Image: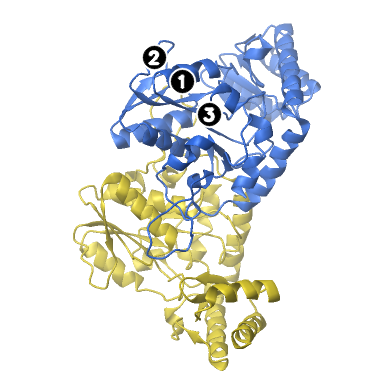
Chain colours: A yellow, B blue
């Protein structure tokens, strides 16, 4: 089931059958992904992550570095990757929705011998993406929002086929084992994507995830991405109309599917939006009101209504 | 939600509010539990696990020992625990249903300075159990069968209150962090059971688990355990009636809620039971047909029917 649902990710991220397992949560998948990359670069002792990366990515990296005595180097424009085992990086910034140069950065890392573990949590289902065209070998993501899964929907791991038989990850569970009930025998995992599995896959979630992912697959990422760009363009126009401030890129090809509105009272505004108007936004410290626009379900009128309410709260 | 559902485990295993988190799967919880115990015994380099322990427990232990350069010592009757950090042990044998001496073994380990991580997967919801009365400080288990959860239902971790503020586990996720979205700040986890959380809790599963656990709580473990003993006694009588062989203890106070029937053709018998009669049993190598009897849902007539079919297959 983790592989069957994983195969449906092909229409979303360009993966091939057998390259994705849908399982557990993103935090865990990042943990495994970092260990997988470290195992592929055993002579390197540095992990790179941005100081303002999504918190769980950063915490996981810092925890692994602490436990294994590795160094964490902040991601900067001129960061040296020549001694780096793995970079953990989000394709789309979780605050501003800014899209980074995936192909360029992956090629730069590869040239310097570093792996990149891409976090596609705000990417898969929001924009068009093709792991193979971009040179991506290792990626994780959630199916929470843009893949219609809701809170706690299972995450997924992509491992390019050519790496699968080499990888090791630290949590050796019976669902990775060739013969699950083999007694008094050592751990001998499958040679494929099942190497990332641990315990019993969560069936309730997988059944829901299968349908959620299939829904995006049927609608088609080109159409979804096009509506996403139109939604965010409309949102930026409305932000301008109300005189609000955004850091979300104005170039549609450089952004994902959410909007960042800056205001010093962001935390209170998010609370008031929910309490007074049932508009659910997220606060992103220090000063961002983040509005997620999921192309399959968000309407243009929702964007107008939400931003009109936000503007009213700011000006009252 | 992981804590709210966890509190419902009090009626099942005698834990106090705030001592259980329901989250992720048992394999992961074992992984975390072993690391927690290792962190509490930093000067010890040995993990003990039985050579015939449930596979995922054994694989996880072997994986951790390999990665950290620790030694795995097999659990034997006279095992020396004086240099052992942690013993991973199932309360009820997953094949025979034999119940071990939890209080005695925990006391013995404590006297020698070793932690015990108890696996209650075949225990919680099957027999009466009281973590505090038995001296248990660290335990994990599933909610799959005896807590009515079905495949992939979330697992749970019990950490005795007095240990919680000291524990460390390797997967530092944002759901353990006091301020989830704190930027450019280090990981600073809660001081309570939330230290074991990783990513977004699986809401679909938790909602189902809450009801499943509550159901056992409402029925009451004394009544459930009493029916479990009656079911297994009846099962053993039927096994005797058909001249079959079992290793499940005949003393009702020494067994859990499943039956082990030995036969050299066990793997084929389990297949045939399912294909011909829709009787779902498990094969436990090398020669066990295992019949799970969940007290809340299994009827006496189910046991007769299943064993009569098994006997028919064996004698045909």
| Residue that carries the numbered disc 1 in the rendered image | B52
Horizontal side of residue B247 vs B79, given as left or right: right
Judging from the image, mark 2 belongs to the subunit labelled B
* Location of residue B99 in the rendering, given as x and y in whole percent from the top left corner: 58, 17
Q: Tell me the residue at 37%/33% (across/down).
A: B38
Q: Nearer the viewer, residue B231 or B33?
A: B33
Q: Earlier in the sequence, mark 3 or mark 1?
A: 1
Q: Are marks 2 and 3 in contact (CB under 8 Å)?
A: no
Q: Dot 2: few (<14), some (14–19), or many (≥20) neighbours within 10 Å?
A: few
Is label 3 on the same chain as label 1? yes
Tell me if residue A142 comes above or below residue A261 in the rendering: above
Task: Tell me the quarter of the picture where residue A241 sits.
Answer: bottom right
Q: Nearer the N terminus, badge 2 or badge 1?
A: 1
Numbered disc 1: secondary structure: loop
Quarter-of-image position of residue A234? bottom right
- For residue B79, the mark is 2
Query: B216 or A249, which lies in front?
Result: B216
Q: Is residue B146 visible?
A: no
Callout in the foreground (2, 1): 2
Residue A94 vertical position relative to residue A232 in the rendered view, above or below: above
Disc 3 and disc 1: Cα gap in Å? 14 Å
| Mark 2 and mark 3 on one chain | yes
Q: Which residue is mark 3?
A: B119
Q: Is residue A128 above or below residue B43?
A: below
- Report the front residue among A314 and B220: A314
Q: Is the residue B128 above or below the residue A178 in the image?
A: above
Q: Chain of mark 1?
A: B
Q: Chain of mark 3?
A: B
């Amino acid at each position: 089931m983790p592989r069957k649902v994983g195969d449906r990710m092909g229409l979303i991220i360009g993966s091939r059958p057998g390259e994705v397992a849908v399982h557990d949560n993103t935090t865990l998948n990042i943990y495994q992904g970092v260990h997988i990359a470290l195992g592929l670069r055993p002579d390197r002792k540095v992990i790179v992550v941005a100081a303002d990366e999504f918190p769980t990515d950063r915490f996981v990296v810092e925890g692994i570095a602490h436990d294994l005595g590795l160094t964490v180097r902040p991601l900067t424009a001129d960061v040296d990757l020549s001694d780096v085992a793995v970079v953990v990086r989000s394709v789309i910034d979780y605050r501003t929705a800014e899209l980074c140069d995936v192909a360029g950065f992956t090629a730069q890392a590869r040239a310097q011998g570093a792996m990149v573990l891409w976090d596609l949590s705000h990417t898969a289902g929001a924009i068009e993406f093709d792991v193979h065209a971009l040179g991506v070998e290792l990626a994780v993501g959630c199916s929470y929002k843009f893949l219609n899964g809701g809170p706690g929907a299972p995450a997924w791991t992509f491992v390019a086929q050519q790496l699968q038989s080499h990888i090791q990850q630290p949590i050796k569970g019976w669902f990775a084992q060739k013969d699950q009930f083999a007694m008094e025998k050592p751990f001998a995992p499958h040679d494929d994507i099942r190497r990332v599995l641990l315990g019993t896959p969560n069936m309730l979630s997988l059944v829901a995830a299968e349908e959620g992912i299939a829904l995006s697959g049927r609608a088609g990422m080109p159409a979804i991405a096009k509506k996403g760009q139109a939604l965010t363009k409309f949102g930026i126009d409305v932000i301008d109309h109300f005189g609000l401030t955004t850091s979300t890129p104005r170039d549609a090809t450089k952004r994902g599917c959410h909007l960042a509105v800056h205001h010093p009272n962001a935390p209170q505004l998010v609370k008031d939006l929910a309490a007074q108007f049932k508009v659910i936004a997220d606060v992103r410290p220090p000063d961002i009101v983040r509005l997620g626009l999921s192309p399959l379900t968000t309407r243009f009128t929702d964007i107008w209504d939400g931003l009109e309410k936000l503007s009213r709260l700011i000006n009252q």
